[in-house]
Structure formats: structure tokens, C-alpha cells
Amino acid sequence: MTNATTAYGPLPNSNPTQYIQRDYTAQFLSRLAKTNAPVLSTQPVLNAHPSLPPQFAQVPSLQRLAELGAADKESSWSAFQALWSELMMPNNQLDKETMQRRPRPRVLMALDGIANLACLTRYLSPSMHNIHPLDLTLPRHFVDCLSGATPLANGGAVFAADSAANRPATPALDLAVRQSEDVGTGERPLVDPEDPWKAIDERALVALRNVPVWRVGGLGRDEVKRMLEYYARSGMLRGRVTEGMVTEMWTMSGRGNVKELERASLEGIM
Amino acid sequence: MFLLSYSFLRHSFSVNDPTMAPQPCWRCLTRLSIRPPISTSVTSSSAFLPHPQNFSTTPSSLAASAAQRNAPKRGRSALKLTKNKREKNYKVPSVGERRALRKRIVLSNTNALEVSDLEDFSVENAADRDCIGEILQLRGATVDGLRSCQAFRTGQSWGYFRRPATMVREETVGLAKALEGAEEGGCVRGLIVGDRGAGKSILLLQAQALALMRGWVVMTFPDGMAYVLFSSAICHGLTTLPSARLDKRNNRLRPPP
């Protein structure tokens, strides 16, 4: 979303200027429509959306709304806004056509690679400054949901994983995680106490430090044993799984790191 | 050829000399085709021969015209060898083929043995503390849903086993219980952190699988960094906005004016 490989343009009448990534939004809507076809095809469109082009007028379901938004790149962002407002409608809406009350489904939002949203993007503004990810509409929407600024009206969950692949250096995210996990005195300065002169992205820090942290640790010995037994039953681990092997593999994998365990034990993985 | 014509001339001028050999007649001469001299002045040869013709057995109707014959040869004044071009005996991959190959997700390995007694990864099993450490298999519609929301990543080891399966961990149970609580209308938020290779993306995948099973709407952003690689094929496919223009030389988008 942030390495400047998709088309972008300014959102009209926005101050400060927000930028739309219409191709990315269209792909996002396409993915949404494909994944949630069984759920969204039963959800009717209850409101009129005059900002959308005429082909969106008589849309039978939210599934079709997402598909049309994916096909028409120019109106992909408006289509997403319409879809979001429909999903956030309260549950006691009556569908006048079928005279049924159909509750809106819960929403799960999942993002991999949150570190990319905690530092400046590679997009350039007209004044040749890097655009902040919170000035891009779709990333901003996600971060607002993650931080709680935009509540999920009908319930749901928002998860962001800090992927290690292609991870930029983000002091803002590291500090936000530390401040979120620390249940100490309650002082949460906008600078890193260990190095106050280090430049921190304040916007990202403020947005992310209110998010509860879910820390993933290593596997225990018992879990390592079960994993090795599964590998052996799959034929991808030669030899008997003994207590000695379990301890050895637990140690070699850095106290149960799954990826290192796979590297140490599975045939064919370097 | 010039010499040949000259020899006939010498003979013609010595008709009255009795010591010379018998001379061919003019009529015979005209039947032969004598190639005119290389010098381009056709008129000079015609001063000696009344009917200059080609001296070859090729009929004159098929012979090249004088203009074509006398035209200076175009081309090279130096010797030029052709390049030793290697023959392409491979097929150039089509646009996007290499990227598709690189980003393919393989979920099954037929060389692996089948482990058939695994239970399903379900909403109940994932929230059960007794299942911690158990490996549960992902089935059918869930796998299809996870594939379409791009939950599987290329660096993961799905391709080593017969069927996709995942382990229930302490964190998975916490996640499943949190989603159960959100079913009543609450909102769960989480920032999943940990060491490299600890299982953060897998935990996210488990969350997506549970949400799909519960009938939730799953919105995914598989890569915080744009997953659309910057290749010329994609650039050509982008219709340029009036605001952002494509700078082909530097392979980047120029900012809006």
C-alpha cells in the first residue's frame, strides 16, 4: 500500500489533502467480493448513495456493490465508502422488499505488515514531500479502525500483524508496542525515553499506542514434540522422535521458534 | 570481353589481306551476344559494333537490362561478417508469468504421507484449551476462502505437507475466545507482534479462518507494502490519472501537479 507502485491521486475537497489509491482500492474490493460472496450476496443495499455513478443505482446486494466498485476504478473509493456505511448500519433495519430484518454481519479486518504504515510512504505530494500513510484514504481507514477512532458498529475484530518480511525500520511502532505493553506509571511521552533525539513519527505513535498487543512467543517442549511427530507422520522428518531429539530441536529453534524448527527438522528446507 | 570485341575488329579491318585467316561474316557476328565493356559509355562501343548485344547464351529478353547491369553496386567497401547469433531455443515467458510462478501458493505435496486422523480446525476446537498443541486440518471451503483473501504467504511451509493443517496454540485459544466475545457486538483489536518466524502471520490466518467459519465479512490487506510489483507490464496497464503521471525513465509515479 505504501511503496508507491499503485496509482494515486488527491481526494477532492479534502483539507489536509488526502490521497486515493484507486487501483489498490479496486483490487481490495475484488478480493472482498470473492472471499465474502456467500455472506454479502444475502445482504441488501438499504440506502441510496447519490455520490455513486448511475450503474450503482439498482444494486441488489452488497456483493454486487463490491463487484461494481472493483470493476470501475474511478469510483472504487466511493463504492467502498458506500459499502462500509451499509455494513455499519444498525442491525434493526427492515428490508422493505422482503420485509425481513437481516442483521448485518460482523467484520474482521486483518492486515499483515503494519510496520509499513508507521513510517512515511514513497508516494510524493505535489510539494515533493513523502506522503504519510495516514494521508492515504484506505490505510487511514484501517488505522482508524485499529486504534478505535472508527468503531465497528455491529461488532467484529481488527488485527494487524507486524510481519518481519520487508520490514522497514520503524521506531514509532516499536515505541508504540512498548508503551502499550507497559502498564507502568502511565506516562507516555512522544519521544523514546532511551533516546529522546531519535526521530519518531508522532502521528503513527499516537494512533498505534492505544492498541492492545498480542505477543506471539515460541513453542513449548510439548508443542515441539507434537510438531515433530506430525512432520514424521507426514514423512518429512526421518528418524525417530525421541526426547533427546525434542530437546535438541527446541534448543536449535531458539526455544521453539516455528520457522527455525522447520529449518532444523524438515527435509528440503534450507 | 573488351578484348574479344577488339579481336573481331582487327579481323574486320584486314579483310583484303590474303595471309589472314578467313573472317567471320557480319551476320554471324550479330547473332553472337557480346557483352559491352564495363565502361559506361555505350556509345563508344557502338562506334565499332553496329549492334551491341549480350555475349551470352541467355536470350536477350531474359537478360538484365543495361541500366541494371551498369548500376553501381550498393554497399560495403569493407568485408563484413554476419553476427554469430545464437538461436533462441527457449520460449520467452509471457507477461506476468514469472511473477505468478514466484508468488504461487502450493498447499499440497503428493510426496508427503497422508495424516488422516486429524480433526478439523473449527470454532469449537480452536477455543478449547484441551486442544492446545493439537494439529488440526483446514478444510475445503475455509481453504478456498483463505486463498481468495490471500492469507497464505509464499514463505510458509504449506507445500511440504499433504493437506494444510495448523497447530492450536495458547494464542489461538485466546483469539478464538475473543472472537466469541465479539459475536455479541463488541470489538476486539490487536497488534500481533513477536520474533521473526514466531507465527504472527499464522495467527492472523487462524483469525481469518475463524471469522470465515463464523460468517463474518473478512477484509484483508495481505501486504502493508503494495503487493503490486512495479513492472513495465503493470505500468502500461495503469491508466494515468490526470493527477499522477508515470515517469517511465525512473519507473516511478510523478506527483500530481
Image (tube, coloured by chain):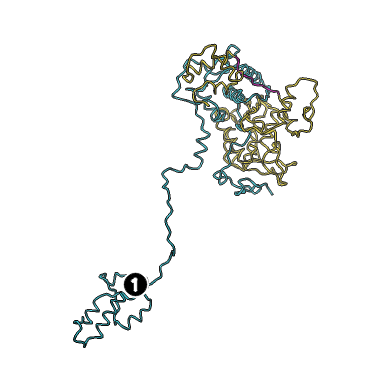
Chain colours: A yellow, B cyan
- Whether A47 is drawn above or below B177: the answer is below
- Report x, y in % for residue B45: 33, 80
- Report x, y in % for residue B203: 61, 23
Q: Where's the N terminus of chain A, which quadrant?
A: top right
- Whether A91 is drawn above or below A220: the answer is below
- Whether B13 is drawn above or below A139: the answer is below
Magenta span has B158?
no
What is the span of residues highlighted in magenta in the rendered image?
A212-220
Using the image as rendered, state which of residue B153 and residue B27 is in the foreground: B27
Using the image as rendered, state which of residue A19 and residue A179 is in the foreground: A179
Q: Is residue B181 visible?
A: yes
Magenta span has A214?
yes
Q: Residue at x 42, y 55 (%)?
A: B82
Which residue bears the numbered disc 1? Answer: B65
- Report x, y in % for residue A169: 68, 33
Q: Residue at x 25, y 84 (%)?
A: B12
> Crowding at label 1, few (<14), some or many (≥20) Cα neighbours within 10 Å?
few
Q: Secondary structure at mark 1?
A: loop
Q: On what subunit does the disc labeled 1 rest?
A: B
Q: Residue A223: which quarter of the image?
A: top right
- Report x, y in % for residue B223: 61, 33
Q: Residue B29: which quarter of the image?
A: bottom left
Q: Is residue A101 visible?
A: no
Q: Amino acid at mark 1?
A: Ser
